[in-house]
Amino acid sequence: MFPGVRKKAFGQVVKDQKEGQVALEKARGETPARRNFHNAAKIIGDNPNLLELRALQSLADSGGSTHVLGLPKNSILPARTARSKPARFAAPEQE
C-alpha cells in the first residue's frame, strides 16, 4: 500500500498517461481526416457540380424530412421572363 501523498501522485501520473494516449489517438485520427478533406477539395475544385450532386444525395438519404433549398436568382429569372413574354416572330418580308 502507498501512503496518501504517493497514492495521489501515482493516480495523477496514471490519469496524465491516459489523457496523453487519448490526445495521441485523436491526432492520429485527424491526419486521415485532413487528407480526406484535401482530396475532396481537389476533386470539387476540378468539377464543382459534384458538390451539388453530393448535397442532393444527402437529401435523398435523409428520408421523410422536409427541406427548403435556396436557388440562385439567375436560375429562376430566365425561366420566368421566358414565360411572361411570349415569343414573337417577325413576319416574312414581302418582295
Image (tube, grey):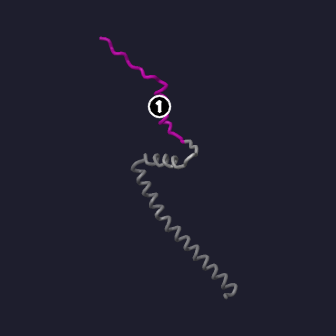
Q: What residue is disc 1 on?
A: 79
Q: Give residue 62's position: percent from left, percent from top.
A: 54, 49
Quarter that holds the C terminus: top left
Quarter that holds the N terminus: bottom right
Q: Give residue 77's position: percent from left, percent from top.
A: 49, 32
Query: Residue farthest to the left?
Result: 95
Residue at (42% x, 20% y) in the render: 88
> Which element carries disc 1, helix, strand or loop?
helix
| The magenta stretch spans residue 77 | yes
| The magenta stretch spans residue 44 | no
Nearest to the observer: residue 63 or residue 18: 63
Please provide the residue range marked out in magenta: 69-95
Residue at (43% x, 51% y) in the render: 44
* 10 Å crowding of disc 1: few (<14), some (14-19), many (20+): few
Q: Image height check: is 61 above or below 20? A: above
Q: Image height check: is 55 above or below 91? A: below
Q: Give residue 13's position: percent from left, percent from top.
A: 61, 80
Q: Quadrant of residue 2?
A: bottom right
The amino acid sitting under disc 1 is Ala
Query: Residue farthest to the top?
Result: 95
Q: Quadrant of residue 86?
A: top left
Q: How many marks?
A: 1
Residue at (43% x, 22% y) in the render: 87
Q: Image height check: is 69 above or below 16? A: above
Query: Residue farthest to the front?
Result: 64
Q: In the visual, does 12 lie left or right of 87?
A: right
Residue at (49% x, 48% y) in the render: 55
